[in-house]
Amino acid sequence: MTATGSRSGTSITVTGTTRNIRAGSVVHPWIKVNGGKAIKGTPLAVGTDGSFTWTYAAAKGDSVRVKFNVRGIKSDPIVL
């Protein structure tokens, strides 16, 4: 699984792709804001092409670290 993110003001968008994961499988985001406790994000489904897109509204200046997990396969952490 690969994932990359971008930020525009307070909107964070992460797009990713999976391999050998069935369409409709669920991706679970885990988030840390400003290095705090990890919280679960809203799960999302993998598309038919293996892709997923996740958005998060953060306060201006927040540091957001996110990692994705699908069927035990985890992405590298992304810091935005």
Image (spheres, rainbow, N blue to C red):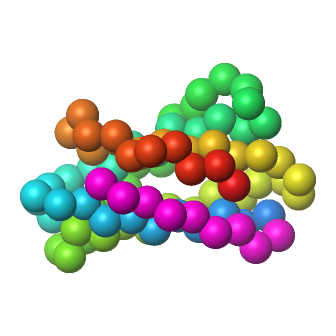
The spot of residue 80 in percent (x, y) is 69, 55
Magenta stretch, main secondary structure class: strand
The spot of residue 36 in percent (x, y) is 73, 26
Whether residue 41 is visible = no
Report the residue at 43% width, 60% height from top. 3
Q: Quadrant of residue 19?
A: bottom left
Asked whether residue 6 is drawn in magenta, I would say yes
Report the residue at 30% width, 54% height from top. 1
As drawn, the residue found furthest toward the top would be 37
Does residue 7 sit above or below 65 in this rendering? below
Does residue 66 sit above or below 6 in this rendering? above
Whether residue 40 is visible = yes
Nearest the eye: 51 or 25: 51
Q: Which residues are magenta?
A: 1-9
Does residue 56 sit above or below 11 in this rendering? above
Q: Quadrant of residue 65?
A: top right
Report the residue at 59% width, 39% height from top. 31
**In the drawing, does residue 26 fall left or right of residue 57?**
left
The spot of residue 48 in percent (x, y) is 18, 74
**In the drawing, does residue 31 fall left or right of residue 30?**
right
Q: Quadrant of residue 45?
A: bottom left
As drawn, the residue found furthest toward the right would be 61
